[in-house]
Image (cartoon, grey):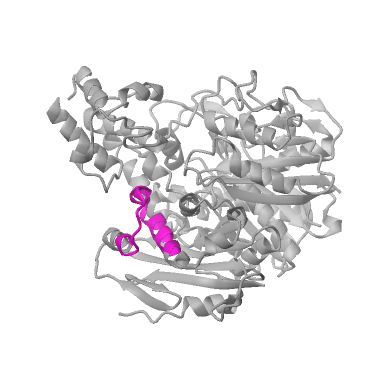
Amino acid sequence: MDALIEKLKGQIIEQLNLVELKPEEINPDSPLFGEGLGLDSIDALELIVLLEKHYGIKIEDPKDGKTIFQSLRTMAEYIKSQGKG
Amino acid sequence: MNSITSYAHIKHNQVSVNGTIVFQSGATALTDFLMEVYKAIGLNYPKFHKMDAQCKLGVLCTEYALQQTGFLESHSLQQTAIVLSNAASSLETDRQHQQSIADKSNYFPSPAVFVYTLPNIIIGEIAIKHKITGENAFFVSEKPDAALLVNYTNALFAEQTQAAISGWVEVDGDAFEAFIFLAENTENINKNTNFKPLNQITVIELYNQTKWMH
Amino acid sequence: MVFASYSNIISPLGFSTRENYAAVCDSKTGVKKIQLPFATDPFCVAKIEEALIQQYVESIGNFQEHTKLEQLSILSIKNVLEQSGIDPKDKRTLLIYSTTKGNIDLLENNSAIDKQRVYLPAFAQHLQAYFTMAHAPLVLSNACISGILAIIVAKRFIEQGAYDNIIVCGGDILSEFTISGFKSFNAMSNEPSKPFDAKRTGINLGEAVATILMTNKKELAQPYHTQIISGASANDANHISGPSRTGDGLYQCLQQILSVPKAEPGFISAHGTATPFNDEMESIAFERAGLSSVPVNSLKGYYGHTLGAAGVLETILSLESLKHQKLIRSEGYDTKGVSGNISMIEAHVSKSFSSFIKTASGFGGCNAAALFSKV
């Protein structure tokens, strides 16, 4: 799980152009949206692309994203639950 | 009385403000150059890194033109217009999007790229950064068209507009250039000998003013 | 005074304004679920039938030398020139072209046409050469407000004095480029779109070219006897793809255009794209501007979202609406699904009125609105 979380940190920094952020600065339990990383609606869509591109997971209903993308940890747990991490 | 009160020009890896070169870089890649300029002007704006190169260029050039002018405080932001132009529209980013859909076995169109396949997003980014809510227009012309920009900003000044950010912003392949001038109603502003009249000849003069280093 | 004059619409519903208005009155829609060559699943889009284009395009000499958008634009502009009798060579005449992507299909296809024409100035010069126009056309590319903004720009330039006649042409074609992009935004509906409806899920893309002549010449006011009274654009300064939740930019436009004496709009031709956010935002802006009792429609249920053509096409149909004293049903609407207090046009109905508002909003936080009124 930790390895997956570390890998995810690098991937979201790249996919979302979070250029000024270092992986060690991301708390896996902080909210991705709202406070925490403060991601926006386009970032939410980009995370869906990330899941498909790197893990082959297709999210049919973007509304599912709310729970899946709550934090880096919930993302990692979802990936594992799909047998992909 | 409408005057041009400040202008900035980015070209040939250099930044010029009111005709004087204030920054130059030996960077070979555009992304590196833009990052250097971002740091040189001391911008602290994380959204910058999500922008495409053309928007970054437009935002930076505007920052330089705005520096130490008090332009945004002199007029209502609702009455501040942004009128920009270029020849390539958003082609550089269009090519990127096109590439992402070219290979059916590696088909991942990105919303973060697609949103930048419209040239007026440069206007949007400048508006968001400075909370400017006035008139917008993005024209696509073969070359910088001083007459068009001056005539249109004057038409806006004849209505509610009191200030305008105007110019040319383009990234096309390896070529890039941004020229931004600030025009405003200077009726009630203390006369400043640096104010220049808002007309076609002046805009062309200021555009050609910088002695670029080669 | 700037009058709205002769017009033309080329769309899935016909190749003239008259055909299009008749089709809309007949509640026909150009939106269909079709199989597109590049997609595995069918898409709900409003596409102009190839066979129909082939029929009309033969009237253009050497039509294979023009792209699809150029062919349709030439047909449309030609039609307006013929109706109005104005001379494109005249120095006091200008063409303003409104488009979001122009010849973007040149990026993907292998046609023999010069790839340089993916550049909008080259596209514009191509039209200039065809019609031997005195001036290079102005090209406006400002996302989905381009069409109505081009009409407002025309008004401003005519009033400034440099031109008497400005032909405003708006056009965009369906392309894999655009469809794939909107799909990545999850903005498209798989069914015919339902603007302002509780069950709306997104847009249908459409293609069209629409042309209208704006003029200060009284003798050319004959088609509609209507002038554009006021127009404005404004930016939300909020987010590059999501509109202001409180409709700030659009509200600012509406305040401005309504600040003229005796502004009593008979209806609003809304942008109404059927995305959850756009329609919600528009309803809030309309209520804030005191327009709650003014009937509203979106024409996107008939045409899909035609991007650069939308503002021109929808203005023309609204002019027809005004001319015939008839309100057109907001196709796709059944139950209110927005929180702003607004009045939807649920069925075609005759009404006596003398003016209307056209609104538009787009990516980049832009908004625009214009008020048209019978002279």
In this view, the residue in front, B80 or B192, is: B192
Above or below residue C321? Residue B88 is below
From the top left corner, tell me how far across and down residue B88 is, in percent.
45, 59
Question: Is C216 rendered above or below residue C47?
Answer: below
Give the main secondary structure of the magenta stretch. helix
Asked which quadrant contains residue C220, the reply is bottom right
Q: Toward the viewer: B117 or B21?
A: B21
- Residue lying furthest left: A3
Is residue C16 visible in this depiction of the protein?
A: no
Residue C257: where, in percent of width, then height? 73, 47
Quadrant of the rendering where the N terminus of chain B is positioned: bottom right
Left or right: residue B180 compared with residue C320: left
**Nearer to the camera, C244 or C21:** C244
Residue at horizontal 35%, vertical 74%? B22
Magenta includes C329?
no
Q: Is residue B75 left or right of residue C214?
A: left
What's the magenta region?
B38-63
Residue C36 in which image quadrant: top left
Task: Tell me: C175 left or right of C124.
Answer: left
Q: Is residue A36 visible?
A: yes
Residue extending furthest front?
B190
Give the residue at x 70% y 43%: C315
Q: Nearer the viewer, residue C12 or B17?
A: B17
Q: Give residue C339's position: percent from left, percent from top.
A: 61, 25
Q: Is residue B59 magenta?
A: yes
Residue A77 on image: x %, y %: 22, 21
Q: How many marks?
A: 0
Against C350, residue C237 (above or below) is below
Question: In the figure, is residue B85 to the left or right of B36?
Answer: right
Task: Locate the C terminus of chain B and report the quarter of the image it occupies.
Answer: bottom left
Residue at (44, 70) in percent of width and height:
B8
